[in-house]
Image (cartoon, rainbow, N blue to C red):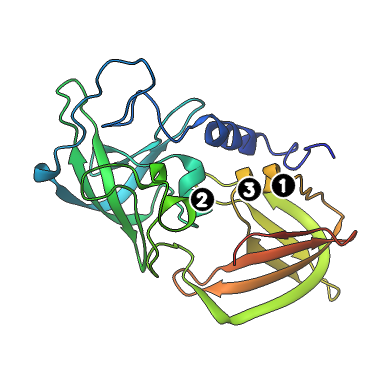
């Protein structure tokens, strides 16, 4: 099956390419090294942690960037690979009010701050552990190397709100910044249902196509953090099913 999922949405190509290009480690990862590489820097100065509260004024994301960065209160902060944020249902966009615990690098030539934990409203995500090591590099713990806990998932889903709807795909919109794409489903009564999807990396990797005009059944639930409807499972007209969230 080909991968035409968001061929009409040029913005998503950039986001998907950046997500796929970002590895779990890299030369820019504090405290890590590549085989045969010189000794790594000394990681983050965890004794110099600070909390930055404010509104995101910029999300900087481009092809090949190891860690996208955001600007809050005129301070540039590196966050985490796009795939990690989106697969844990955590989104960041200009205009979001956030509280960020961050620390500087021990490498004097590295002037960035690195986010340790980000809180946006009732949702929060831990990006680095108490030693400053990125949690997505861990081989243990929960999904994507995260420790288990109710505050890890940014979607804050209410299981009791889960329901199912069938309709025709009206359109798929690419996310702006570090955000999930959304799908608009036209129901039999002509009403429109807008749903947050999963990360493009997950959908593209599953060869699951979402084309305007196709019939789709969606199981979804309500986010108690944002009030948005979040897709849990997609089933195409051919019976193919993609589980986005458990």
SS category of the residue bearing label 3: helix
Q: Is residue 53 shown left or right of residue 175?
A: left
Q: Quadrant of the N terminus?
A: top right
- Rounded to the nearest angstrom, the CA distance separating label 3 from label 1 is 6 Å
Residue at the disc numbered 3: 202
CA distance for labels 2 and 3? 9 Å
Q: How far apart in space, not on screen, are marks 2 and 1 (Cα)? A: 16 Å
Check disc 1 and report the residue beneath it. Answer: 206
Which of label 2 and label 3 is nearer to you? 3
Q: Is residue 228 above or below residue 207?
A: below
**Are the residues flagged by discs 3 and 1 in contact, CB closer than 8 Å?**
yes
The residue at the point 35 percent across, 42 percent down is 79
Image location (x, y in percent) of residue 86: 51, 50
Looking at this view, name the residue that lies furthest to the right. 238
The circle on residue 86 is 2
Q: Position of residue 43 (x, y in %)?
A: 21, 33
């Amino acid at each position: 099956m080909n991968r035409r999922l968001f061929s009409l949405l040029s913005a998503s190509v950039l986001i998907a390419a950046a997500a796929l290009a970002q590895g779990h480690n890299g030369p820019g990862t504090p405290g890590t090294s590549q085989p045969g590489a010189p000794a790594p820097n000394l990681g983050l100065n965890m004794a110099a942690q600070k909390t930055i509260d404010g509104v995101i004024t910029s999300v900087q994301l481009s092809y090949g960037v190891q860690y996208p960065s955001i600007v809050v209160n005129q301070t540039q902060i590196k966050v985490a690979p796009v795939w990690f944020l989106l697969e844990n249902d955590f989104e960041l966009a200009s205009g979001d009010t956030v509280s960020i615990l961050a620390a500087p690098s021990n490498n004097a030539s590295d002037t960035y701050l690195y986010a340790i934990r980000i809180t946006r409203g009732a949702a929060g995500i831990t990006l680095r552990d108490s030693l400053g090591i990125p949690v997505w590099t861990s081989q243990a713990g929960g999904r994507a190397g995260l420790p288990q806990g109710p505050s890890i998932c940014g979607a804050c889903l209410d299981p009791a709100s889960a329901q199912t709807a069938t309709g025709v795909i009206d359109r798929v919109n690419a996310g702006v910044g570090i955000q999930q794409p959304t799908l608009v489903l036209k129901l039999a009564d002509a009403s429109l249902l807008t749903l947050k999807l999963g990360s493009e990396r997950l959908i593209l990797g599953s060869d699951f196509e979402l084309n305007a005009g196709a019939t789709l059944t969606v199981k979804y639930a309500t986010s108690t953090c944002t009030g948005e409807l979040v897709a849990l499972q997609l089933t195409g007209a051919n019976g193919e099913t993609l589980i986005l969230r458990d």
